Image (cartoon, helix red, strand yellow):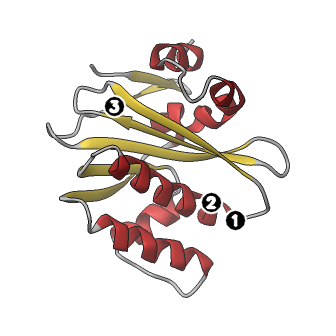
Amino acid sequence: MLILVPSSGCESLWTPPNPGTWKVNFDVANLNGVDHGWGVMVRESEGDIVLARVCPGTGFLGSELKEARVCYFALKTAFSHGVRSIILEGDCKSLITKLKRKCVIAAEVGLFINDIFQFSYLFYYCAFEFVKREGSRVAHYLPHLQTMIHLLGFGLPMSQITSSIWH
């Protein structure tokens, strides 16, 4: 199933990975001046959402550091659910560039990048791709739904998540 996502006058087309490979979108959303949340969404090669996770966060962290933390969380989440061939998609271009170039820097974000690399070796296939916010819309809006999802024990049906975001 291909999903078209409208974005300011043009459409972004979700492209499926090869069969047996899963796409994992991750994003951080600022919920107010201090709190933020992480959203992770896993799709199989037909485009069906098979897993969505959220995690609350607090504190003042730089955007790249928050994105690196949720990328690591996304890897661990996918691995714990049996995914072994993965394409991670995020909208933080600076982080994705460092991951694609295998660039570890001497800063706090570098520690998470190193952890991401170490964990990625557990996968048969692991790639990192930049996607604009419009291409990762569900992952971006999941943290905004985290209070409702938490109250339901992370059991919110995917159709309810996607219908509240697309409509």
Q: Residue at x 24, y 59 (%)?
A: 123
Q: Residue at x 35, y 74 (%)?
A: 118
Q: Identify the image quadrant of the C terminus.
A: top right
| Residue at screen point 43% across, 62% down | 96
Task: Bin the neighbour count of mark 2 within 10 Å (Cα to Cα): few under 14, some 14-19, many 20 and up.
Answer: many
Asked if labels 3 and 1 touch by Cβ distance under 8 angstroms, the answer is: no
The 10 Å Cα crowd at callout 1, few under 14, some 14 to 19, many 20 or more, is few
Q: Given this view, does label 3 or label 2 mark the residue nearer the observer?
A: 2
Q: Are marks 1 and 2 in contact (CB under 8 Å)?
A: yes
Which label number is shown at residue 66? 2
**Which residue is tagged 1?**
62
Query: Mark 1: which secondary structure?
Result: loop
Horizontal side of residue 163 vs 1, given as left or right: right
> In which quadrant of the rendered image does the N terminus lie?
top left
Callout 1 amino acid:
Gly
Q: CA distance from mark 1 to mark 3?
A: 28 Å
Residue at image mark 3: 14
Report the Cα–Cα distance between label 3 and label 2.
24 Å
**Percent x, y for residue 157?**
49, 17
Task: Give the x, y percent position of residue 159.
Answer: 46, 14
Q: Is residue 150 above or below residue 128?
A: above
> x, y (%) of residue 66?
62, 60
Total number of numbered discs in the rendering: 3
The foreground one among 138 and 5 is 138
Residue at the image position 54 percent from the left and 55 percent from the top: 70
Residue 166 is left or right of residue 103, and the answer is right
Type of the residue with mark 3: Trp
